[in-house]
Image (cartoon, rainbow, N blue to C red):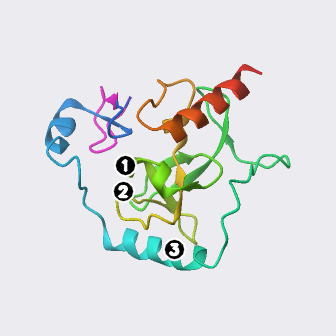
Amino acid sequence: MVCEACDSPYARWVVGRGTALCVPCERVGAGRRSREPVLVGEVLGATADVLRLSSRTGAGVPDPWGAGGGGAVCRACGGRAVWHRTVRGRWVLIQAGEWPVAAVPAGRRWRIAGDGTAVRLGAAAAPSDTCRVGHADVCPARPAPYDAPSLLALWHRNARRAAL
């Protein structure tokens, strides 16, 4: 596994951060658990999406794969998700569907900007807004996310689909 902060090998999955980090990067970030730096471009993209979504009414989470949609297939579990490029040029596999921000832990919230770029929201989101979830957080091939009931429910749903 490769560290997502510095691209060095021998990283390990850090459940509390929802990312793969090497030991030095994990130590450096250990003091910043409640707050993380946010780029201005991320905030502007997220703000534009909040304004666009504010006129919609949230009537549950639709299943975008129900009509035989596309997407990528996770190599670990065989589940479907969509690849999106992040602001920093990396790629992240995003789970289908939107979730209430209040149900998703701060370090695991994603927003897809109008140009298809994935933006990590962190704690900078309105409580009445919606967000997306990275597939790595709910992949049944990884340990279950017991720290968030909504992610655990999605993990179980993905595990049932993978068993079929």
Magenta stretch holds residue 55: no
The residue pinned by badge 1 equals 107
Q: Position of residue 86 (x, y in %)?
A: 45, 57
Rendered residue at 67%/29% (across/down): 78
Q: Nearer the viewer, residue 10 or 153?
A: 153
Based on the displayed image, in which of its 4 quarters is residue 74 positioned?
top right
In the depicted structure, whether residue 60 falls above or below residue 13: below
Magenta highlight range: 2-13
Q: Closer to the N terminus: mark 3 or mark 1?
A: 3
Which mark is drawn over residue 122? 2
As helix, strand or loop, the secondary structure at mark 2 comes to loop
Residue 39, percent across and down?
A: 31, 67
Q: Is residue 60 left or right of residue 44?
A: right
Residue at which label 3 appears:
50
- Left/right of residue 142 with respect to residue 4 in the rendered view: right
Which residue is found at the position 46% from the left and 31% from the top? 145
Circle 3 residues within 10 Å: few <14, some 14–19, many ≥20: some
Amino acid found under the numbered disc labelled 1: Gly
Q: Which residue is drawn at the image coordinates 53% and 33% (left, top)? A: 152
Q: Position of residue 51 (x, y in %)?
A: 53, 79
Q: Residues within 10 Å of mark 1 (few under 14, many from 20)?
A: some
Of callouts 2 and 3, the N-terminal one: 3
Label 1: state its secondary structure.
Answer: helix
Q: Is residue 21 above or below residue 29?
A: above
The C terminus, quarter of image: top right
Against 125, is 149 above or below? above
**Looking at the image, do the residues carrying marks 2 and 1 touch, with CB atoms under 8 Å apart?**
yes
